Image (cartoon, grey):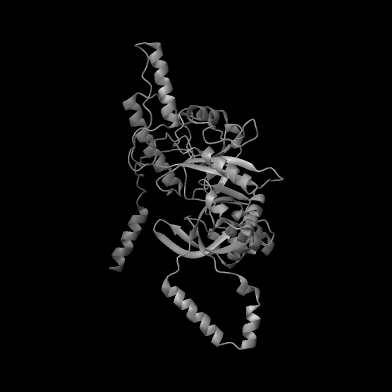
Amino acid sequence: MGRKNAARRKAAQDEPTSAPKNVTKKDLTPSGSTHTNIDLMNPEPRGVAQFPKFGEFPYDIRTLIWEQVLLSQRLIRISLEKKEVSARNRNQRNKATKAKVRGKGKKQLREDEGSPQDDIPEKPYCVVVEERYAMSKLFHVCTESRDTANRFYRVKIPCIYRWGNKTQEGTFYFRPDLDNIQVGISEYFPDFAFNLYQLDPRYVGLVNLTLPFQPNIQKLMDMDNAERDILRGVLLRLENVSFAHMQEKTRAPPPPRRTLAYVHSMALAAAAAANNGSDEPQPPKPRTAWEPDCTGPMSTCIPSFDKLSRDPRKLGNDHTRPYFSFKNPIHIALSWFRLLEILPTVHEHKVNYRFMMSYETSGRNIATREQATSWVQSQRKNFKSRALSEGIEHGEWVQPAMGFWLHPMECVGSLVNDDGNLKTAKDVLEGLQLKEALEKCVPELCLSRLV
C-alpha cells in the first residue's frame, strides 16, 4: 500500500501543470446583477500586510504609529434619552445604600457626607451612541495599542451602544479636536456637553456640533438661570456647527409632493407649453420618491472620514435636478440663531456654519467597498430603467462617493433682514431659488473610510 501511494505522488509531481481555467471577470454593464468595476471616490483601505519587525522599534516610535492610525475625523451620532429606572433596580439601590450606612461608623459617615463624590447627583438621562463602528480596533489588538487609544481619547463617559435592535453598555471615547457629535439640543444637552468639558484634561470639550433637527426652544426656556448659564458657556465654545439634512428612502412611493425637483419640472413644463411646438420633448415627470442617480454622497455606518476642500467631480443629474425632501435645512439654522438671540449668546470668534447633506442608504448599513459597489449598481439599474420609460436623457455616470456634503451657509444668502432682525421661515429660500443657490456653490466632500 505504501509503495502504491508513493508511486501516485511521484506521478502527480511529474504531470505537467494543467492549463488554467477560464475565469470570467465580472465587468458587467450597469444593468447586471453582480458587482461591477465601479470606481468609488473613497480611498482604498490600507493593506493588512504583516510587519514582523514592528516590535523591534523603540516604544516611542511604536506609540507614534498607533496614534497615526487613530488620527481621523469622526461623525458620531448620539441621542440623549430619559433614563428609565425600574422599581426592582430602585429597591436594590436603596438596600445597598442602607447596608453601606450600617457598615460604617457615625464618624466615617459624616466624613463621607462631606466628600465631593456624594454631591454628584445621578444623571436623569443616558447617552446612547447610535453607531456600529464607533470604537477603534486598536482597543482589541494588544495591551500597548489599547493603552495608546485610552490616552488618545481624552474623554470617556458611560454609554449605551445601539445599532438596530441590539444594545450594549459600554464607554464612549471622545477626542474633542477630531470628533463631531451629531445630537439634538434638548433639556439634557447642556449637562452632557458640560461633562465633556469637565472631563477633558485640556478643557476643550465639545467644539464640533451637528444638529439633526430644530432645537426645542420651549423646553430650553423652562430651565433655571444656572442651567441657562451652563448652556450659554457650552455654545460659546463651539467652533464648527453643521445643520444636517439626510434624504431618507421612503418605504412606499408617496403621492407627488412639492419638492425641488417638482418645482423644476413644473417650470420646464410651463416653458414647453408656451412654445406650442409639437416637436418639443416632454419634460421629465417629477420624482415622487427617493431616486438619486448616485451623484450625491450616500451615508454609511463608518464614522471616520476624510475631507476634501471641494467636490472635484463634474456633477450630473442629481446636481442639476437636486431632490431633497420638503424639510428645508435652513429652518434648522433659523431655530439655532433664534436660540442664540434668546439666551443671549455672542461669539467673539468666527464659527463655521455649514449644511450637511447626504442620501440615506437602507439604514446606513454600508461599511465595505463591496457593499457600496453593490448598492450603487442596484441604484443605477433602477435609475436607468426609469430613464428609459420616461424619456429622461442621461449622460455619463458620475463617480460615486460614500459620505456627505458640507455646503457653506453663505450660499443661501443672509438670514438677517435689512432691519437687522432674523428672518422667518417664510422669508428664506425655497424651491427653485434654493436649488439655484446650491448649484452655484461647490461643497466640501467628506469621504467615509470604508473597510
Label count reads 0
- Quadrant hosting residue 109: bottom right
Judge left or right: residue 168 versus residue 195.
Answer: left
Judge left or right: residue 360 versus residue 192.
Answer: left
Picture residue at 62% right of the left edge, 72% below the top: 119
Indicate the quadrant containing the N terminus: top left, top right, bottom left or bottom right.
Answer: bottom left
Judge left or right: residue 79 versus residue 178.
Answer: left
Instruction: Check the image and name the residue furthest to the right.
Output: 348
Relative to 9, does residue 328 appear above or below in the rendering? Answer: above
Location of residue 49 in the rendering, given as x and y in whole percent from the top left corner: 53, 54
The residue lying toward the viewer, choosing from 358 and 22, is: 358
- Quadrant hosting residue 35: top left
Location of residue 280 in the rendering, given as x and y in whole percent from the top left corner: 37, 14
Location of residue 378 in the rendering, given as x and y in whole percent from the top left corner: 37, 39
- Quadrant hosting residue 294: top left
Picture residue at 55% right of the left edge, 63% below the top: 139
